[in-house]
Image (cartoon, rainbow, N blue to C red):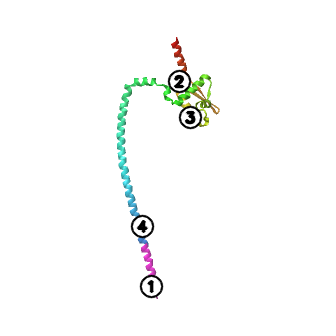
Amino acid sequence: MVWWLFRNKIKEDKWEKLHHSLTLSFSNIKSEIQHLTKSLSHSHKKHHYHHTHLNEHEQKIRVLSKRLEQLESLLKIQPQQTTGIVVTESSQTNPLDFLTDTQRIFCQKLALLQKETPGKWIPLKYLAQELYPGKDYQQIRSTISQFVSTIEDLGFVKRIRKGRQAYVLSTDKNPFLNLKKKQEQIIEAETK
């Protein structure tokens, strides 16, 4: 007869556990919703901040593009007025102005070696040893190659490769090769 009392007690414990579980679940849901609300609020503030700054940047870009258009229109007028000046300035530029001091020395050494052995191709390795005595060629090979590329673009030298060795030859455009010839011509003209 007493068994129904225990049965009711078991049912009550079961309902209490269910109640406690539901209360805990709903409190978790409530805290997650609050967290999502805060996160959305923060995202909304960020979005508003970025939107405002984007509008400011767009306005700045518009202003800058108008200024650029004004500058372009001014520049289109000026070259037509000063074309004579530009031509005279460009005709007076010295090709050596485009070279660094080391590249000038490179041209000068090449011209000196070329005068000693006219018409012969000079090994790049030998020229590197003349420029940088005491340094290993492998350490300075890329630097020398860049010098030759720049000077080759200006037309001062020609470069060829034979096997694993690179050779250079000074052209008539090399200012240091022609410099001595010009000085000799000036001296010759003065003596006459």
Query: Distance from label 1 to label 2 (Cα)?
Result: 118 Å
| First in sequence: mark 2 vs mark 4 | 4
Of badges 4 and 3, the one in the foreground is 3
Q: Find residue 123 and report its horizontal and vertical position in percent.
A: 62, 29
Q: Is residue 176 above or below residue 5?
A: above
Residue that mark 3 sits on: 143
- Mark 4 and mark 1: span between their CA atoms? 35 Å
Q: CA distance from mark 1 to mark 3?
A: 100 Å
Q: Secondary structure at mark 4?
A: helix
Q: Which residue matches tag 1?
A: 5
Q: CA distance from mark 4 to mark 3?
A: 69 Å
Using the image, tell me which numbered label, if any, was put on residue 175.
2
Q: Residue 85: name its quadrant.
A: top left
SS of the residue under disc 1 = helix
Amino acid tagged 2: Pro
Could you classify mark 3 by the number of other residues whose Cα lies within 10 Å: few (under 14), some (14-19), or many (20 or more)?
Answer: few
Determine whether, in the image, residue 64 is placed left or right of residue 134: left
Q: Which residue is mark 4?
A: 28
Question: Does the stretch in magenta take in 9?
Answer: yes
